[in-house]
Amino acid sequence: MYDVSDKKNAIKALQTCLLELSHVIPELPSHAVTGVFSETTRDDLMIFQNHAGLPCTGIADAETWAAIKREYDEAKANRECAKGLPFPLTLPLSLGSRGTSVTLVQAVIGELCEVYRSIPAPGVTGRYGSPTAYAVGLLQRRYGLSETGTLDAATWRRMLADYTARTRLSEGRDG
């Protein structure tokens, strides 16, 4: 048996996560956090489940909560990466991605390729094609990450740290 306040807090937590994820999952609409498990909440949950490749039950079971937590944590990490940048970076980036986020990433990769000469610079095109995926994969290998070619938050953090450290060294600053 649930204590009503615990159930309401759980529903608020679910709605808060879904609201946050609505910023990174285009098909997920944003709705207010009410603490009431309404048809809207159920529908949003089913949209998330479909997105995550889970059975669309509209029930927040353990598997669904785990998927929500993974995606929520990734979205939160992406937001942390974007702090201090001239514009928000949308992650993950993979084959077919386009836009200013890709342009920024390609510029950073180009600078890193000046240091890691065995990695070919993909060029700054604003399109995430095979050359960008290949360069990201090689950087992931260098950083000891899974070599997927997809730019996720962990890869971006490592690239930014590497880029920042090298920029400071080249400018004669040590910290």
Image: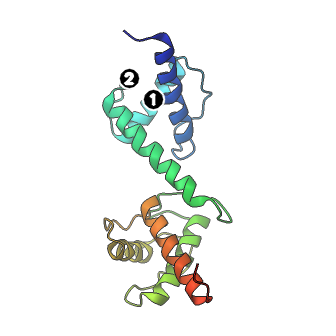
> Residue 124, how many percent across, how many down?
56, 79
Type of the residue with mark 1: Leu
Tag 1 residue: 45
In the image shown, does 62 or 164 lie closer to the viewer?
164
Please tell me which residue lies in front, 130 or 159: 159
Residue to which mark 2 is pinned: 59
Residues at marks 2 and 1 touching, judged by CB atoms closer than 8 Å: yes
Query: Residue 149, position in %: x, y?
Result: 37, 68
Q: Is residue 99 visible?
A: no
Q: Earlier in the sequence, mark 2 or mark 1?
A: 1
Q: Is residue 6 left or right of residue 138?
A: right
Q: Report the number of discs.
A: 2
Which x, y percent locates residue 128?
A: 48, 69
Q: Residue at x 47, y 17 (%)?
A: 6
User: Which of 167 and 107 lies nearest the eye of the viewer?
Assistant: 167
Q: Position of residue 17 (x, y in %)?
A: 51, 35
Which corner quadrant holds the C terminus?
bottom right
The residue that appears at 45% across and 69% down in the rendered structure is: 158
Q: Residue at x 32, y 70 (%)?
A: 144
- Where is residue 83, by image quadrant? bottom right
The residue furthest front is 175
Give the amino acid at mark 2.
Ile
The relative height of residue 105 versus residue 97 in the rendered view (above or below) is below
Q: What is the secondary structure assignment of the residue under circle 1?
A: helix
Residue toward you, 2 or 111: 2
Q: Is residue 128 above or below residue 113?
A: above
Instruction: Please identify the residue farthest to the top as the structure is shown.
Output: 1
Q: Residues within 10 Å of mark 1 (few under 14, many from 20)?
A: many
